[in-house]
Amino acid sequence: MTTKHPIGAFIIVDDDLDLRLAAAQKLEIPTAQILAPPKNRRGVDDVKILQEKFAKANVKITTVFCGFEGESYTDIPTVQETVGLVPLETRFSRFDEAKAISAFAAELGVAVTALHLGFIPEKNDVAAYRDIVEITQQLCDYCKQNGQRLHLETGQETAESLFQFIRDVDRENLAVNFDPANMILYGSGEPIPALKMLAGHVKSVHCKDAKWAVNPGKEWGEEVILGDGDVNMELFLKTLKEISYVGPLTIEREISGEQQIKDIEKSVALLQRLRSEIWGE
Ligand code: MG
């Protein structure tokens, strides 16, 4: 790979994996973040099959994302109730699951485990905040044993809150997967200033675009094809250069089927053009 900013795609490992990999190979996408397959498909044989399939398609897996049973992104209040390690009823079973996914990622030879932590409680809610700091520390320490970093997906918090949280967790292998569209979708702040604030903590990114909701933070914004939203992809990539970001540019398009592949194809072309203009790569 001659570029320090290889293009990537977010790939779900399911029965359509072969189709997704064929599309990635056709578009010459060299890297991917994957969503961890379910528990019963993370055995030794599954690891071997996945490694072979990705190698055959010339796609390197850079990150394994955790997804948990019972999570729902229907609307913002539902995310608060159901996503990540924050909801108490499922916290400890999901903590075990996240560790199992980290171990699976290690078997695959992947150096990053990532997740949506959920809506981190306000810092003045002292006990609740401390509990999330502690469980994140434990998860970071577990990932470290596996030679990995833990990346937190942005979206639920303002950049200030996330920055403070990272300081409080105080683990060198904790970093950010910066998704500029999520800042807009959740209404948690302008993405470019957020990226500048989190700067050195950003170790992976999603190239995703979105339009602001009429009432940001109360209702979802709208995810759109890369380049058509309010992120300003050119400024996003220029800012990545400014903060000396090195790492993949992972396209995330949260729709499915033929249209997803078409949109990814256009996104690849846009990113290649901007990458060449901005980094000369
Ligand atoms: Mg994302």
Image (spheres, grey):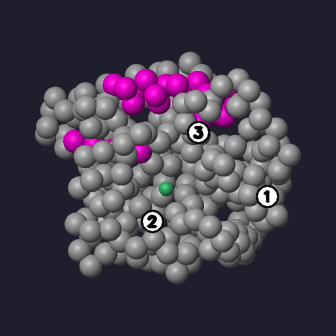
The relative height of residue 11 versus residue 180 in the rendered view (above or below) is above
Name the element at disc 1.
Answer: helix
Q: Which mark is residue 94?
A: none
Place residue 40 in its image quadrant.
Answer: top right
Say whether marks 3 and 1 touch (CB < 8 Å).
no
Q: Quadrant of the C terminus?
A: bottom right
Q: Which mark is residue 37?
A: 3
Task: Answer left or right for 188 relative to 19.
Answer: left
- Of badges 1 and 2, the one in the foreground is 1
Say whether marks 1 and 2 touch (CB < 8 Å).
no
CB of mark 2 near ligand 1 (< 8 Å): yes
Residue type at mark 3: give it.
Pro
Q: Position of residue 105 (x, y in %)?
A: 62, 31
Q: Nearer the viewer, residue 145 or 5?
A: 145
Name the element at disc 2.
Answer: helix
Residue plotted at (47% across, 42% down): 67
Lower sequence index among marks 3 and 1: 1
Total numbered badges shown on the rendered structure: 3
Task: Answer left or right for 90 relative to 16.
Answer: left
Instruction: Please give the residue where the numbered disc 1 appears in the rendered image.
Output: 22
